[in-house]
Image (cartoon, rainbow, N blue to C red):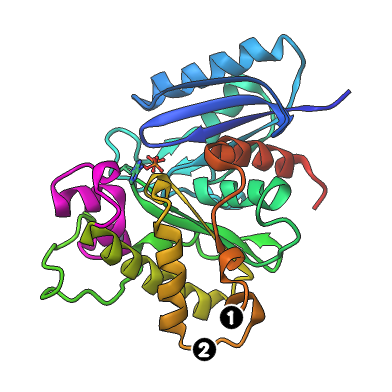
Amino acid sequence: MTPLFGGIEAGGTKFVCAVGSGPNDIRAQMRFPTTTPTETLSRASAFFSEQARQGELAALGVASFGPIDPNPASPGFGHITSTPKSGWAYTDVVGALQQALGVPVGFDTDVNGAGLAEHRWGAAQGLDTFIYLTVGTGVGGGGMVGGRLMHGLIHPEMGHIRIPHNPIDDPFPGTCPYHGDCLEGLASGPALEARWQQSAAALPPDHPAWELEAHYLALALTNFICTLSPQRILLGGGVMNQPHLLPRIRRKVLTLLHDYVQAPAILEHIDTYIAAPALGDQAGVLGAMALAMAAIAEP
Ligand code: ADP
Ligand code: ZN
């Protein structure tokens, strides 16, 4: 019998819970808004308890908004840490779920989870060093280096890098509560909406917003390429629903790199080098499921 895994995509606005064994075998799925930690985690536990009647869960995975503590050796493991999201700072997510459900719980960032799912089933198969970047309510990046999910000191915070920002061309100060004009402050969905005073989805393709957006994202990607040497970069998140954005970013990355990184993957195959994730809006919850599988896999 195929073992069943539970996954929770824990987002700042919604939770998505699912049970199954992979993209073609989702047995049940439920989504609900993120409210208080107690209410939200109880709702998730109740869903999995109910599902467990149809077969025991082998493990649960949580792909969470952050910042989090993903280090199993740390006393704070399994917690969301210093989030500005009201009520959620220092919430013990793994502890609450483990206590309610009594199964092993894998825990990582939403973007590491999505990266792991893309590696297992999607657009990063066969690679050992790649980035999954989401451009949505926030900007966040994860993925693998040398076949392992990126952790290190804590976990990468690729959305908060500093990039050149010329206040004469773009006087918008940025939306990041910590840094103002970091990448997230300049290029997230809410940053677009605050700068242009309209919904990002409604900005027409020929609006100057998009050249500027592509410019900031291309600067960031160029920095990541030079720092991590990824074999591929996957760009997800709500803002990337604009189909014209990916081609613009690719062109600008080529211009910024200026033939310096001599790799056919970049110089000849930029369309697959900077690409959309294959799992679409399921990447989050499948990522959580992949973290569940990893939680009980042999090291
Ligand atoms: P989250 O980051 O909360 O998980 P999303 O990745 O869906 O969620 O990102 C939501 C953000 O994406 C919103 O702030 C919105 O501005 C932006 N967004 C959503 N749809 C579009 C679209 N079609 N075009 C551009 N921006 C969009
Ligand atoms: Zn920031």
- Is 294 placed left or right of 49 in the picture? right
Q: Which residue is mark 2?
A: 259
Task: Give the x, y percent position of residue 77.
Answer: 54, 46
Task: Give the x, y percent position of residue 117.
Answer: 65, 46
- Is 213 placed left or right of 251 in the picture? left
- Is 118 placed left or right of 179 in the picture? right
**Magenta segment includes 241:** no
The residue range painted magenta reads: 178-206
User: Is residue 88 or residue 236 the one in the foreground?
Assistant: 236
Q: Residue at x 50, y 59 (%)?
A: 154
Q: Residue at x 13, y 73 (%)?
A: 167
Q: Which residue is mark 1?
A: 267
Amino acid at dot 2: Asp
**Magenta segment includes 201:** yes
Which of the two discs, 2 and 1, labels the residue nearer the N terminus?
2
Q: Residue at x 49, y 49 (%)?
A: 69
Q: Is residue 234 above or below residue 57?
A: below
Task: Give the x, y percent position of residue 288.
Answer: 60, 38
Instruction: Please identify the quarter of the rendering in which residue 103 is found.
Output: top right
**Callout 2–callout 1 Cβ contact below 8 Å:** yes
Task: Give the x, y percent position of residue 248.
Answer: 40, 66
